[in-house]
Image: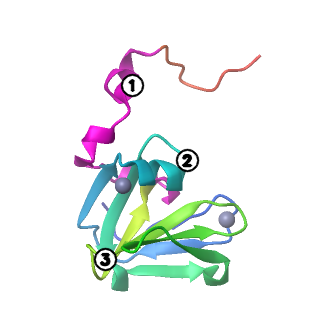
């Protein structure tokens, strides 16, 4: 991964830079992560908070207290989840991989809370698949 990886929300209000290599990337399949992303699971990377630089749109980040242990930060214009803070990862920003401008630049290597993994995760490659969206 090159240094100076960048990310942003969908509307472009919030922009950030990763100023060092992430320590790890993971998928979390817990039911809270499903709720806070509205998706089947959450994919995140961990980086020192000091190396996670918000370059633009700090005032567009709204903080939501997910639980006693965790906070979510999302764009209050477009809703894109940007990063979480978690008491079990002190000093780390837990950045949503989907908000990277090039999300192919890092690959998760572990799955957490696999007991709550949706069963179709295991057969996703067997589904009827299209290289692009369905068009009429
Ligand atoms: Zn936005
Ligand atoms: Zn989770």
x then y, percent, for residue 50 = 35, 86
x then y, percent, for residue 123 = 35, 20
| Residue at mark 3 | 87
Near-viewer residue (112 or 132): 112
Q: Secondary structure at mark 1?
A: helix
Does 13 appear in magenta?
no
| Image quadrant in which you'd find residue 77 | bottom right
Q: Secondary structure at mark 3?
A: loop
x then y, percent, for residue 95 = 42, 65
State the mark number for residue 38: 2
20 over 103 or under it: above or below: below
Q: Quadrant of the C terminus?
A: top right
Disc 2 CB within 8 Å of nearest ligand 2 atom: no
Say which label, 1 or 3, has the lower sequence index: 3
Near-viewer residue (68 or 14): 68
Is any part of residue 4 visible from this angle?
A: no
Q: Quadrant of the N terminus?
A: bottom left
Query: Residue most toward the front?
Result: 68
Say which label, 2 or 3, has the lower sequence index: 2
Disc 3 CB within 8 Å of nearest ligand 2 atom: no
| Residue at mark 1 | 120
Region rendered in magenta:
98-127
């Amino acid at each position: 991964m090159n240094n100076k990886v960048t990310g942003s929300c969908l509307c472009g209000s919030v922009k950030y830079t990763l100023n060092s290599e992430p320590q790890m990337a993971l998928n979390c399949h817990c039911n809270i992560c499903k709720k806070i992303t509205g998706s089947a699971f959450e994919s995140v990377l961990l980086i020192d908070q000091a190396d996670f630089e918000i370059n633009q749109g700090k005032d567009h980040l709204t903080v939501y207290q997910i639980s006693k242990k965790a906070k979510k930060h999302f764009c209050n214009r477009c809703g894109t989840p940007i990063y979480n803070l978690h008491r079990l990862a002190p000093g780390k920003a837990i950045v949503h991989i989907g908000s990277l401008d090039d999300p192919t630049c890092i690959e998760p290597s572990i799955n957490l809370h696999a007991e709550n993994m949706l069963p179709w995760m295991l057969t996703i490659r067997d589904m009827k698949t299209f290289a692009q969206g369905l068009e009429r």
